[in-house]
Image (cartoon, rainbow, N blue to C red):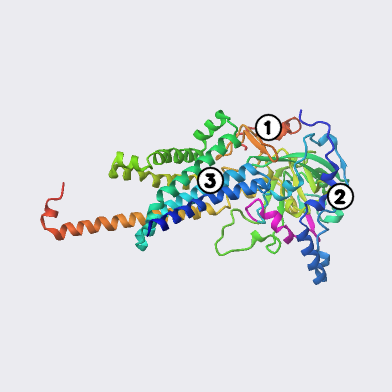
Amino acid sequence: MLIKRAQMFKASEITDPTLYFNRREFMVGAAALALFPRGAEAAAPPAGQPLKATRNTAFSLSDPATKFESATTYNNFYEFGVDKGDPSRLAHTLKPRPWTVQVDGHVAKPKTYDIDELLKLFPLEERVYALRCVEGWSMVIPWIGFPLASLLKRVEPTGQAKFVEFTTLMDPEQFPAQRKSVLNLSPIEWPYVEGLRLDEAMHPLALLTVGMYGQVLPNQNGAPIRVVLPWKYGFKSAKSIVRIRLVSSQPKSTWEKAAPNEYGFFSNVNPEVDHPRWSQASERRIGEFLRRKTLKFNGYADQIASLYAGMDLRKYY
Amino acid sequence: MSRRTRIAFKASVWVLCLLPLVVLAYRAVTGDLGANPISFVTNWLGQWTFRLLLAALALTPIRILFGISWQVSLRRLVGLFAFAYACLHFCVWIVVDHFFDWHQMGADILKRRYITVGMLALTLLVPLAVTSTNAMLKRLGGMAWRRLHRLVYVVGVLASLHFLWLAKKGRTDQYLYATILTLLLGIRAWDAVRRALRKRRQQQTAGAPGLAEAPH
């Protein structure tokens, strides 16, 4: 059993965000605000703004959290670029306000929510989750959010709803890598689309996330709202979501389209099923020296494995 | 070129080849290796191995294209540095990345084709490094030595495959390295063909029997 009583991290990791945060970029943003007041309503809430949430100990690991600096400078967010450093370097181009999330498809009550409305609708909770990247590294991150199921129940999925499809913002103004270039080097299609089966989406582990480390979600981590699915490889957790659509047939996810033999629809963490080019048996936890053995479903087998009972996980990778 | 200039030149090549290690050490000391230092160091050493290999392979094409030949004497030095970086790259993989997990590494060598070709490239560099001394050149004889050292072209191709197969989607520098290698080998091939044709023409003009007596 992996879920243990949570242990508090050092207060400094939570209450001293300015130390880590990219102050220069914040200052540039502030200067732009002063120069162009019309953009004021589009400005992001100040980076590092604290976000209150109560720790959900039943859904929290006791492992120490990854350093905030690592979690915000070592990111895969292809909308900013392919390098791990691109998202933190270019994150200031994303404007997380104003922001709306359209929730529609096979639902009784489709609605387009304003992000600030969403934040008030559901009580925010903090959960310390393991994050396993398909590339073979992992982190432990204290996320802040609310269960995806809470939002889905609110819009009342109809009987035809079998899958949930997430769409990331498509805006080349805000996401530099979405700009068209003469040489089309983009490895994936925009916008980024991800999907889940409805029962996966309704599982209490699936978290709609708006913050981490006690503060508003940094842009490079998928602001203002993303999903976090700790039992799946990281790329399944769509960032900067603008649309959640309930559909009747299985959505084609972005990486599935880009390399179907390497990235399946399910992409559950599984040490027994290798990536075609590398082993998934072990991982390097950021901040640690020795590799760790990768756990099935990233350590969440007790809670989640029943969803896949009877499925051939080699076939449905 | 005088002896003194040549020595000065070799010394500066030493400095240039050691520079990536100095920079790496500096970044390590100042804690500037990023969130995943092991991956950073592995990539850094691998990239410099490839760059030095390409540099060593570029010296002859420079002679072919521009008729300048003094730099050809640097082949051994640059090539040995490429080998040294390859060894470091390999050691980091064994010691730091997998910490002597022989079972896992053995499985990776057999199963992951990018590791298979990488291992093969390093293995093929060993006889070249061993026979790089003047004494070995004499012992083998110029012809045999030259033929053996053509293995470096195979190493170049294997290194390219290693990089092409491991690179994640969206990266582009692996194509740049492969293109440069193709150019460098292409120039050699073009030169070899050109020389063969010239030789044949000379034989033809030297006397008609040359053609008639061509081997069957």
Q: Nearer the viewer, residue A253 or B193?
A: B193
Residue that badge 3 annotates: B46
| SS for dot 1 | helix
Residue that badge 1 annotates: A296
Whether marks 3 and 1 lie on the same chain: no
Badge 2 or badge 1: first in the primary sequence: 2
Relative to A53, is A315 above or below? above
Over which residues does the magenta segment extend?
A81-102
Q: Distance between the residues labelled 2 and 1?
A: 32 Å
Residue that badge 2 annotates: A51
Relative to A157, is B12 above or below? below
Amino acid type shown at disc 3: Gly
Q: Nearer the viewer, residue B197 or B129?
A: B129
Amino acid type shown at disc 2: Leu
Q: Which residue is drawn at 30% across and 38% down?
A: B139
| Label 1 CA crowd tier, 10 Å (few <14, some 14–19, many 20+) | some
Whether marks 2 and 3 lie on the same chain: no
Q: Which residue is drawn at 24% across and 57% down?
A: B197
Q: Where is residue A236 in the image (x, y as percent from the top left)?
A: 69, 45
